Image: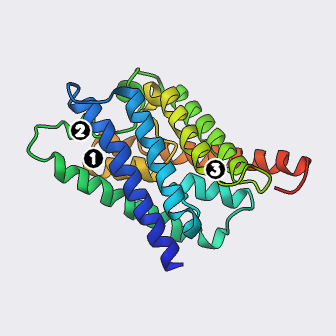
Amino acid sequence: MLKKAMAECIGTFWLVLGGCGAACLACGFPAHGIGFAGVSLAFGLTVLTMAYAIGHISGCHLNPAVSLGLAVGGRFSFKELPWYVAAQLVGGILGALVLFLILQGTGFDFANGFALNGYGAHSPGHFGLGAAFLTEVVMTALFLIIIMGATDKRAPAGMAPVAIGLGLTLIHLISIPVTNTSVNPARSTAVAVFAGGWALKELWLFWVAPLLGGALGAAFYRFIGKSSGKA
């Protein structure tokens, strides 16, 4: 269990450092940034690379919503869930800490630009609470469907990391304007801890919606997967 937790910790560290780091550069330093498309690809690449690096050790969840969803879907033990979530939170916060230290002294606006997730006035496109909640639920549900389908024993071998990484890229392309894309409570918590204020007040949504979406998506795939054979 310790090795699995350590793998989840370093994987989530990489996701936050790579994905949120790209987002901070895109928003805080637009002259040198890579834009929304680049940020979307950065998040996808963190998952793709870590899936190949640690997938055979821990499964490379990197996300409490994924871990919960896989447990609901019958692919993961509920007994291991607390260990995975704790490791993901620690890894994410450490990744945000490194990024925080790198950006110190640059005049970076941590209260508004630290890859934070929000709704209403804090949504990139000023989308309201309802739209943000629906987006996070649906996107996380679809993410779990992609994950469970790509890792199904009947799926093409060795291609799951590519499908999952590209799936997360597409999710970001769709939902960055709405919530700045969470679909991952650990990722949202990691940066909110350093920003404080409104980011912590709105953090509840980025736990509730992804966890709900992850459970729903996994339950759906478990149903359709069994309709034509064992998943």
Say which of 134 and 103 sits in front. 103
Percent position of residue 99, x then y: 24, 50
Q: Earlier in the sequence, mark 3 or mark 1?
A: 3
Say which of 3 and 161 sits in front. 161
Mark 2–mark 3 CB contact (< 8 Å): no
Q: Earlier in the sequence, mark 2 or mark 3?
A: 2
Instruction: Relative to 122, say whether 56 is above or below.
Output: below
**Residue at horizontal 42%, vertical 30%?**
119
Q: Residue furthest bottom?
A: 2
| Mark 3 or mark 1, whichever is nearer to me | 3
Percent position of residue 195, x then y: 26, 45
Q: Which residue is identified by label 3?
A: 160
Report the Cα–Cα distance between label 2 and label 3. 36 Å
SS for callout 3: helix
Mark 2–mark 1 CB contact (< 8 Å): yes
Q: Which residue is identified by label 2?
A: 111
| Mark 2 or mark 3, whichever is nearer to me | 3
Q: Earlier in the sequence, mark 2 or mark 1?
A: 2
Q: Which residue is identified by label 1?
A: 196
